[in-house]
């Protein structure tokens, strides 16, 4: 009887060890890029006259992960994968940013996000995502060429509600969920940067001087946990091009938390 | 006056009079309603309040199937419990009754196969009757037609009679038949409105159809029911069922994008 008890106990202990080891391995394999807290920027007056606290985020999209940042030196394990990354206020490439694709913003706040698109693009597989959705007034501000050296618009700024489906580089899309928390659905298409300039810059080991620049604002509701991802299939060489960078958190997707 | 022989005096009781069989039968009778009630009500709670007659039929069907299956589940449970509690043996010398051979029992096999077959036939017929509501909706000439596109990892909807009203949250008027034309922009998905009791594959390059008539105003869950990638579990959004007036007001408030997937589908439907 005693030996049976010992055997049963051993089986349970070994079982826990095996499951724990697998869980630890999976957790360590996850590319967790930390959490970026939005920067406070005073107040924002919405078109309806309401005044909200205002926060900002500045992001970049890259044709590869070699910028480093949250991927680590020289881009980490998959340096050839396209990736979002934290950017400077004028589109600067932040090679030492420790966070990248998980964001936290306050509740009941105006959030302004600026995204500099350093990558080229192609045609969307679903034109639904070529339209700006869920932002204040359903619009975004767009600059076709932003000069990263002079830090000025190289082309005039435009207000857009959509972009041509064959000129999409990536999208920034926050998904609403089927639960009791406040629903957010946000979609902003990012126009591609000039393909020749992107390729030429990549060959020199850098990024184009003239990314596109898209800025948009939306209002958060109550606290909630959301997921965002790019809806432009940019995981080359995979089924429906939604593998690799598209299916790995920390590259073209991440968490979006409304809290505080 | 008959005289019992010694063999008759030591004859074992009939099998149904054996103590362990009686205990088994009692346990079976007790467990059947318990399992039937818990299993049927738990899944009804998990499925949520129905938002259509189809779903009401599905829930009735699930209750019926669960109650029909509960005697079988209870019998298995009763045998398992009885065996574990009274038939356990420790040590190296098992009792003689532990030694037995597996016998061929054609009558038992035949009974089981026929009973299973009848149960399957019953499930098939009852299921088809329950889903008949959907067929009635799909044949309704006044039905609203909506295009559904699934994409890793979001749903979007395209409304007829508009100049490109498309949304991420589905809006429907209560009490009107709706036909969904589902497709996918990438891999296989499955369009599932949980509380309305409809689910249809959304396949790339193909359009599949299903229909329903929502009969209750409220907010319901839409999910993808086909494992479709990393963020599959987040491929969900809401259905808002509202009055016709509210539905019209919502449609009117939406921006016309000038782009629609509806015209092509509509032409195909004529």
Image (spheres, coloured by chain):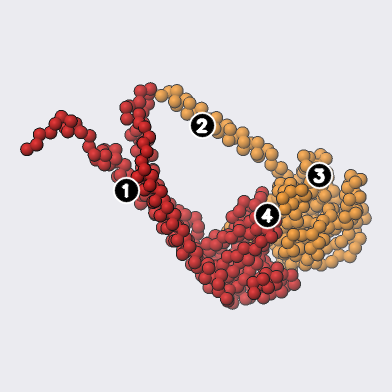
Chain colours: A orange, B red
Distance (Cα) linking label 4 and label 3: 24 Å
Q: Are marks 3 and 2 in contact (CB under 8 Å)?
A: no
Q: Nearer the viewer, mark 1 or mark 2?
A: 1
At horizontal 77% and vertical 52% (from top left) the residue drawn is: A234
Q: Quadrant of residue B199?
A: bottom right
Distance (Cα) linking label 4 and label 1: 48 Å
Q: Nearer the viewer, mark 3 or mark 2?
A: 3
Check chain identity for marks 4 and 1: say if they share one: yes
For the residue pair B16 and A16, the one nearer the viewer reads as B16
Which numbered circle lies on residue B114? none
Q: Work out whether A1 lies above or below A60.
A: above
For the residue pair A8 and A28, the one nearer the viewer reads as A8
Distance (Cα) linking label 3 and label 2: 43 Å
Which numbered circle lies on residue A12? 2
Which numbered circle lies on residue B29? 1
Q: Quadrant of residue B87?
A: top left
Q: Are marks 4 and 1 in contact (CB under 8 Å)?
A: no
At horizontal 64% and vertical 74% (from top left) the residue drawn is: B270
Spot occupied by residue B89 in the image (x, y as percentages of width and height): 36, 28
Helix, strand or loop for disc 3: loop
Q: Nearer the viewer, mark 4 or mark 3?
A: 4
Host chain of mark 1 = B
Spot occupied by residue B258 in the image (x, y as percentages of width and height): 75, 72
Host chain of mark 2 = A
């Amino acid at each position: 009887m005693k030996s049976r008890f010992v055997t049963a106990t051993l089986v349970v202990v070994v079982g826990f060890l095996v499951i724990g080891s697998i869980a630890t391995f999976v957790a360590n394999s996850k590319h967790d890029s930390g959490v970026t807290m939005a920067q406070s920027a005073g107040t924002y007056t919405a078109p309806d006259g309401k005044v909200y606290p205002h926060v900002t985020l500045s992001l970049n999209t890259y044709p590869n992960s070699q910028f480093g940042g949250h991927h680590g030196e020289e881009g980490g394990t998959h340096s050839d994968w396209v990736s979002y990354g934290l950017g400077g206020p004028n589109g600067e490439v932040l090679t030492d940013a420790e966070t990248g694709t998980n964001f936290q913003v306050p509740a009941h706040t105006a959030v302004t996000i600026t995204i500099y698109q350093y990558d080229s693009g192609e045609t969307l597989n679903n034109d639904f995502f070529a339209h700006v959705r869920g932002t204040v007034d359903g619009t975004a501000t767009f600059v076709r060429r932003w000069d990263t050296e002079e830090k000025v618009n190289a082309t005039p700024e435009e207000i857009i509600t959509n972009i041509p489906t064959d000129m999409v580089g990536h999208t920034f899309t926050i998904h609403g969920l089927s639960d009791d928390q406040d629903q957010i659905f946000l979609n902003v298409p990012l126009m591609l940067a000039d393909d020749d300039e992107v390729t030429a810059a990549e060959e020199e080991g850098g990024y184009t001087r003239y990314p596109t620049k898209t800025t948009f604002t939306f209002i958060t509701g109550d606290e909630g946990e959301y997921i965002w991802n790019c809806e432009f299939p940019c995981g080359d060489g995979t089924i429906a091009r939604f593998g690799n960078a598209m299916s790995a958190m920390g590259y073209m997707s991440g968490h979006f938390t409304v809290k505080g | 006056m008959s005289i019992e022989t010694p063999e008759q005096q030591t004859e074992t009781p009939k099998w149904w009079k054996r103590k362990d069989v009686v205990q088994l039968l009692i346990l079976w009778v007790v467990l059947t309603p318990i399992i039937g009630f818990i299993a049927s009500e738990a899944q009804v709670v998990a499925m949520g309040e129905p938002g259509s007659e189809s779903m009401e039929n599905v829930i009735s069907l699930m209750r019926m199937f669960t109650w029909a299956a509960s005697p079988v589940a209870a019998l298995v449970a009763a045998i398992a419990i009885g065996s574990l509690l009274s038939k356990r043996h420790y040590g190296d010398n098992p009792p003689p009754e532990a030694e037995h051979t597996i016998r061929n029992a054609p009558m038992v096999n035949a009974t089981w196969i026929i009973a299973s077959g009848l149960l399957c036939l019953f499930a098939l017929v009852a299921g088809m009757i329950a889903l008949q509501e959907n067929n009635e909706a799909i044949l309704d000439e006044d039905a609203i037609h909506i295009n559904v596109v699934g994409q890793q990892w979001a749903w979007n909807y395209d409304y007829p009679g508009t100049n490109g009203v498309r949304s991420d949250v589905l809006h429907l008027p209560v009490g009107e038949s709706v036909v969904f034309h589902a497709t996918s922009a990438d891999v296989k998905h499955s369009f599932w409105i949980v509380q309305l009791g409809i689910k249809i594959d959304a396949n790339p390059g193909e359009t599949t159809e299903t229909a329903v008539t929502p009969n209750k105003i409220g907010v319901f869950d839409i999910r993808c029911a086909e494992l479709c990638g990393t963020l599959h579990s987040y491929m969900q959004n809401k259905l808002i069922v509202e009055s016709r007036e509210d539905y019209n007001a919502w449609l009117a408030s939406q921006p016309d994008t000038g782009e629609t997937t509806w015209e092509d589908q509509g032409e195909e439907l004529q």
